[in-house]
């Protein structure tokens, strides 16, 4: 096991429980956590995009993304906000994990030139992992969130859509990094890079989820 991989695993085991703590606690602690993440992400975007034409639109998009995350977490129905927020997180995380694991094992044709490590097999793995993980979360939704949810066609469409958006977000941030000639958005998280490197799919997934909530696809 390489030193870089050891750092990645260790930081993951530290960060995940910490993030979940703020998310589940909600209220002021969650707001503080969200503001902190937005501030750091905005700084990373500044370093990545300064003097570029898309500099300002990027800030506006980040603001809308974090506003969407805040609104979803504080959804008025008891239990719904936390459940939907966690569902989005789970979909994005397992989209990333599925793409990495399946892509490494099966390999095959490259998906695009922007992210040379991404393959068609990894894309399929992303969908499989995200659907399976979302099904598990929904299956235990009443136990975890006191919110009874059934995994029917609307939920399946939502999972596939958010997984797709998450993958597009990942590729989009990779493009911006390539244009800036950098590998990572920052060095804050050992073995991972910056916060923007870890939430690249999520910052696209939350605004789309916010819109979906408004039109009533999921409730």
Image: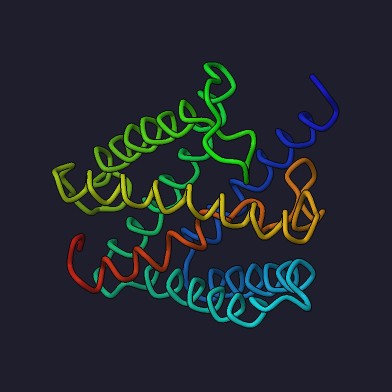
Q: Quadrant of the N terminus?
A: top right
Above/below status of 117 relative to 81: above
Looking at the picture, tell me which residue is in the foreground, 213 or 125. Answer: 125
**Residue 129: x %, y % from top left:** 40, 32
Marker count (numbered) = 0
Q: Position of residue 91 (x, y in %)?
A: 41, 45
Q: Quadrant of the C terminus?
A: bottom left
Left or right for 142, reference 127: left
Q: What kind of colouring is applied to the model shown?
A: rainbow
The answer to whether 114 is drawn above or below residue 179 in the figure is above
Please determine whether, in this image, residue 204 is positioned above or below residue 75: above
Above or below, 94 relative to 19: above
Q: Residue at x 72, y 54 (%)?
A: 178
Q: Return the residue nearer the eye: 133 or 141.
A: 133
Q: Residue at x 18, y 42 (%)?
A: 151
Which residue is more in the foreground, 219 or 187? 187
Residue at figure coordinates x 28%, y 62% from the top left = 80
Nearer the observer, 89 or 156: 156
Q: Residue drawn at (68%, 73%), measured in percent from left and top?
A: 42
x and y percent of residue 169 in the render? 52, 55
The percent coordinates of residue 98 (x first, y second) are: 48, 31
Quadrant hosting residue 124: top left
């Amino acid at each position: 096991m390489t030193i870089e991989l050891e750092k990645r695993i260790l930081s993951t085991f530290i960060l995940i429980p910490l993030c979940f703590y703020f998310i589940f606690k909600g209220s002021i602690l969650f707001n503080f956590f969200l503001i902190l993440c937005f501030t750091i992400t905005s700084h990373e975007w500044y370093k990545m995009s300064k003097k570029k034409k898309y500099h300002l639109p990027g800030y506006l998009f980040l603001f809308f993304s974090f506003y969407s995350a805040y609104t979803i977490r504080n959804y008025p129905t008891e239990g719904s906000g936390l459940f939907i927020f966690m569902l989005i997180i789970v979909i994005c995380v397992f989209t990333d994990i599925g793409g990495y694991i399946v892509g490494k094992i099966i390999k095959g044709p490259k998906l695009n030139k922007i992210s040379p490590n991404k393959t068609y097999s990894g894309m399929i793995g992303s969908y499989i992992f995200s659907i399976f993980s979302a099904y598990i979360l929904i299956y235990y939704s009443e136990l975890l969130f006191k919110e009874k949810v059934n995994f029917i066609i609307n939920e399946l469409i939502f999972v596939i859509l958010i997984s797709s958006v998450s993958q597009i977000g990942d590729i989009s941030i990779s493009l911006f990094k390539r244009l800036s000639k950098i590998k990572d958005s920052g060095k804050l998280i050992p073995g991972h890079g910056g916060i923007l490197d870890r939430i690249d799919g999520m910052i696209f997934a939350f605004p789309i989820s916010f819109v979906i909530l408004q039109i009533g696809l999921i409730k």
